[in-house]
Image (spheres, rainbow, N blue to C red):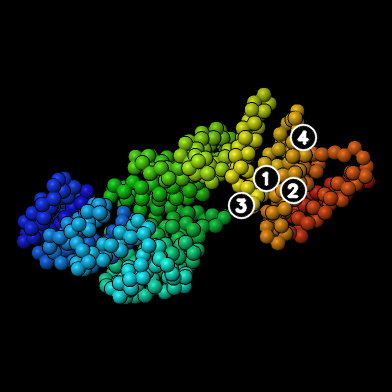
Amino acid sequence: MLTILTTIDANKVVQDAIASVDRLDELVTITQDSNAIDDLKTLVVDSKKITIPIDWYDLEPPYVFPMTPFNRENLLAVVFYKLGNHQKTFEFVSEEYPIYHHLLIATHLQFGYEISSDMIDFCYNKSPHNSAILNYYGVIEKPLDHTGLKKAFKNAISNSENLEIKVFTAKHFLNLLLDSGELEEAKQVAKEQAEIAISDDAKNAINTQFAGILMAQLQIPYNIVELDAVHQMQLQSIEYYELKGLKVQAGMLLVDAAEVANFKEDFITSKELINKAIRYFKEEDVTEFLGEAGFKKAILLYTWSKNGSPQYYKAAINAFQDVLKVFKRDTHPRKFADVHHNLALIYSEIPVTLEEKPMWLAFCASSFKEVLTFYTKSKYPYEYAMASHNYATALMHFPPAKIHDNLEKASDLFEEALEIRSVEDYPFERALTLMNQLELGWLTHNEKGVEELKKYEDMKAKAEEVKSLVSDAGLMEQADKHLQELEKVKSLI
């Protein structure tokens, strides 16, 4: 739906224009009362011009339209653009209409069509904001590099037509800085824009971005004051979006707020927030977001399970199984593999009776096979090594198998991981694998003394390598303990 806010002298012409298209009045409300506007999409029309307000809610491409002369053709073209009927838009205007080029570029931006060099030149000469936006979001033949993008955004901010556009440009500049991890610069820009933001929409946009920046800066061990500050800003933005009926935008922030509540160890609030996000995504039928929120919920439940609340293990399994209804093997193979990786870990860790253990371990093996089917050694070496390491670790705790030796299989998988986790590329990950190999070494036995001596030398070399790879006090201490135990058994070999 769309609302047109008009004046007394323009009202009749606007009414006639809308009435000239069959049933268009069912999608468009015309009012002279600004307080009566309920729709998020609006136009402002007087007897001379059409004003297309800035879209602060990310419902359309972040293109800034100039004020446009008011006539029937321009009005209907813009109305259909706002309603999302882009084909109908260009039935009313052609190239001799100035608004035509703006509508064409915005349409290309929205649908990911190629942005031509003429379009780039057109925006460069008319709007620094649009020029920066095209180079950042558009599909263009020769996009600017990161330095060029930053320069374009800074130029647009410095040369904005008014404060509202300045803050709007900064909102998207902050996206660039967040994506590149330039958090301190982003924080400074957000502070500057918060001081000049005038409209409620602009204030909320900067508040939302500010919360995202502060969340990205959080580090372990978490500072409760910082967590509270981020959480409060998130809740303010969520409330604003909810009042506007923007459930998708509120849902995305609810996911982040649930994570911050989890950092605060406020598990009840965290669960409430993530469940609310999932409900909003279901209501709005946004499958991708629903899957992502479900994945986050499952991760939260799994985290709680491992940290003193084992009653959440089965809830985490159910949550991951729900995610698999969205992220299926044929449509989202990577996400499908990631879900199974987490399920495999849960199946290997969940506290169950001895009678139940074989069933859960069968589930574990099946899920790890799904992971390694997608994360192959050739295409995804890092992920393959991680899955191999985790599978081997799980096998160490499997009961003896009738068909094959679980410990031997674990040893092979650790070696597979070490081929990728080299000293040069992944020293910390290599140290973790070596530590688990040492644990495996204590579980296996050799019948001949020569073999025992060889294993002793191998384990000693691994423990010493760990100490050469990392400075982590915990790992260094564990390596020393292994060396001490090895010295004790050396005399028995």
Mark 1 and mark 3 lie on one chain; the one further toward the N terminus is 3
- Disc number placed over residue 388 in the picture, else none: 1
- Residue 381: % across, % down: 64, 52
Distance, label 2 to label 4, CA atoms, is: 16 Å
Depth order, front residue of 432/216: 432
Can residue 102 be seen in the rendering of this structure? yes
| Circles 2 and 4: CB atoms closer than 8 Å | no
Q: Secondary structure at mark 1?
A: helix
Q: Give amino acid for label 1.
A: Ser
- The residue drawn where x is 19% and y is 67% is 97
Q: Which residue is mark 2?
A: 415
Q: What amino acid does circle 2 point to?
A: Glu
For label 4, the SS is loop
Q: Are marks 1 and 3 in contact (CB under 8 Å)?
A: no
What is the x, y in percent for residue 35? 16, 53
| Residue for point 82% across, 39% down | 444
Residue 221 horizontal/vertical position (percent) = 57, 55
Determine crowd level at label 4: few under 14, some 14-19, many 20+ residues with C-alpha closer than 10 A: few
Q: Nearer the viewer, residue 265 or 216?
A: 216
Q: Residues under labels 1 and 2: Cα distance?
A: 9 Å
Q: Position of residue 429 (x, y in %)?
A: 68, 53
Disc on res. 379: 3
In this image, 90 relative to 22: left or right? right
Identify which amino acid the numbered label 3 is placed on. Answer: Lys
Mark 3 element type: loop
